[in-house]
């Protein structure tokens, strides 16, 4: 059997580049707590992402969780179930009530035509997800948030390095939370960041990621521990040097996939949106069994038999998790349910070879009846 292909493969710098980068950590003995690498990466990211304000975290999940805490939200938060567990869990772990809005059938982001009908007098915020790197309907979300005085926190875990109408994606809403997990377009091994509009929110976040410690003799909030350490920051510094090349290579992979799959009946592909500079984070394909002749699961099995690990991403929907004991009615998000049953995310990473893409597509097309 040819080599096994997983859905993703973490980007890494050359070994020697990383060793060079961490050498001064040995000299200083400064391992964590906002040291020189943390500061340097923060400055580099500010520039790269085109944002005014950014803080770094131990992972994307804590970035989201602490942002919700820092905003001191109450009651209900409107979000979507077509996402990673983290988005919904962050809401619930803050003792807030997630209210699930359906998604748009083309971009898979929050359906802003339905958003307003879910707002009650208990709604305090909207947490939309730029899922697969597809940018939400920012204008509509802004308008609705203003009208009802709601906070907007974007789960921007999939949109590292993207711009919308030439503006850094982290500049929208009250805050945007990014993940730098090993599997993401840009990684710090584990890591995350919050880009925020308001400086007082930034100050709260800075304290919250360090136990709520505000000064040597003052602990002003019940914080957590979510600081990015120096080794992760050093990995980020190295990876950031190569991220543009990595994104260009991802783009070539996406275009190769498109060359095989575009126009195939029964397959819905994910198009790059107008006004968006894409990072080519994911390659989701939606299979219509009636037209294609094989289901998502048939294709998944066939790829699996050939050593290719596609992912049913995002399935199951978060509002069906057994953790919630049937609390949420999945029939209220029928489009999300429909897509989650039919979507398959294909392997995509910078050094996936064109030959492998050809082989993956050949296997997929061999399922077609
Ligand atoms: C990866 C991811 C997160 C969480 O990020 P971690 O860095 O893994 O904690 C949150 N939301 C979405 C949509 C993600 O894909």
Image (cartoon, rainbow, N blue to C red):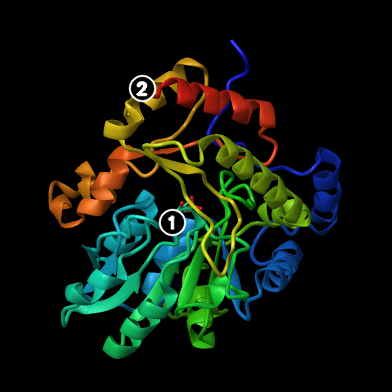
From the top left corner, tell me how far across and down residue 115 is, in percent: 25, 72
Give the camera-side residue of 268 and 60.
Answer: 268
Instruction: Residue 239: tell me if it is visible.
Output: no
Q: What residue sits 31% from the left and 44% below the top?
A: 340
Relative to 250, residue 75 above or below: below
Relative to 62, residue 53 above or below: below
Give the camera-side residue of 292 and 73.
Answer: 292
Relative to 27, residue 213 above or below: below
**SS at badge 1:** helix
Q: What residue sits 38% from the left and 54% below the top?
A: 86
- Name the residue at the top extreme: 1
Relative to 89, residue 198 above or below: below
Q: Is mark 1 within 8 Å of ligand 1?
A: yes
Which badge, 1 or 2, comes first in the chain's sequence? 1
Q: Is residue 141 left or right of residue 360?
A: left
Quarter residue 35 falls in: bottom right
**SS at badge 2:** loop
Q: How many marks?
A: 2
Q: Is residue 285 left or right of residue 298?
A: right
From the top left corner, tell me how far across and down residue 27 is, in percent: 85, 55
Q: Which mark is residue 362?
A: none
Q: What residue sits 46% from the left and 45% below the top?
A: 269
Instruction: Residue 210: tell me if it is visible.
Output: yes
Q: Is residue 55 left or right of residue 30?
A: left
> Would you name the residue on which mark 2 appears?
369
Q: Residues within 10 Å of mark 2 (few under 14, many from 20)?
A: few
Q: From mark 1 to mark 2, how far is it between C-alphas?
A: 30 Å
> Would you name the residue on which mark 1 appears?
131
Give the camera-side residue of 325 and 328.
Answer: 328
From the top left corner, tell me how far across and down residue 264 is, in percent: 45, 36
From the top left corner, tell me how far across and down residue 256 is, in percent: 63, 38
Q: Residues within 10 Å of mark 1 (few under 14, many from 20)?
A: many
């Amino acid at each position: 059997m040819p080599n096994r292909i997983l859905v993703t493969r973490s980007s890494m710098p050359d070994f020697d580049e990383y060793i060079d980068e961490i050498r001064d950590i040995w000299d200083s003995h400064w391992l964590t707590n906002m040291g020189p690498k943390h500061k340097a990466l923060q400055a580099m990211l500010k520039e790269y992402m085109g944002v005014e304000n950014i803080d770094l975290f131990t992972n994307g999940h804590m970035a989201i969780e602490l942002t919700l805490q820092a905003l001191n939200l109450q009651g209900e938060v409107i979000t979507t179930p077509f996402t990673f567990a983290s988005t919904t869990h962050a809401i619930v772990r803050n003792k807030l009530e997630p209210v699930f809005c359906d998604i748009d059938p083309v971009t898979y982001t929050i359906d802003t035509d339905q958003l307003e009908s879910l707002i009650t007098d208990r709604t305090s915020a909207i947490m939309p997800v730029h899922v697969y790197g597809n940018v939400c309907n920012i204008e509509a979300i802004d308008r609705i948030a203003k009208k009802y005085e709601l906070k907007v926190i974007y789960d921007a875990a999939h949109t590292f390095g993207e711009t919308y109408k030439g503006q850094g994606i982290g500049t929208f809403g009250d805050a945007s939370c990014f993940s730098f997990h090993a599997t993401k377009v840009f990684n710090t091994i584990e890591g995350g960041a919050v880009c925020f509009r308001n400086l007082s929110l930034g100050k709260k976040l800075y304290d919250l990621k360090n136990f709520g410690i505000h000064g040597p003799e003052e602990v002003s909030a019940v914080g957590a521990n979510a600081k990015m350490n120096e080794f992760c920051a050093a990995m980020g510094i190295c990876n950031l040097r190569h991220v543009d090349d990595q994104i260009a290579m991802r783009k070539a992979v996406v275009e190769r996939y498109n060359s095989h799959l575009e126009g195939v009946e029964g397959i819905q592909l994910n198009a790059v949106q107008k006004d968006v500079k894409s990072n080519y984070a994911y390659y989701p394909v939606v299979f219509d069994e009636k037209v294609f002749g094989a289901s998502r699961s048939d294709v998944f099995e066939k790829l699996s038999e050939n050593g290719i690990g596609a992912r049913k991403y995002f399935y199951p929907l978060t509002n069906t998790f057994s953790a919630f004991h049937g609390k949420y009615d999945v029939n209220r998000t029928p489009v999300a349910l429909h897509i989650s049953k039919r979507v398959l995310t294909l392997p995509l990473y910078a050094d996936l070879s064109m030959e492998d893409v050809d082989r993956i597509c050949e296997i997929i097309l061999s399922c077609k009846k």
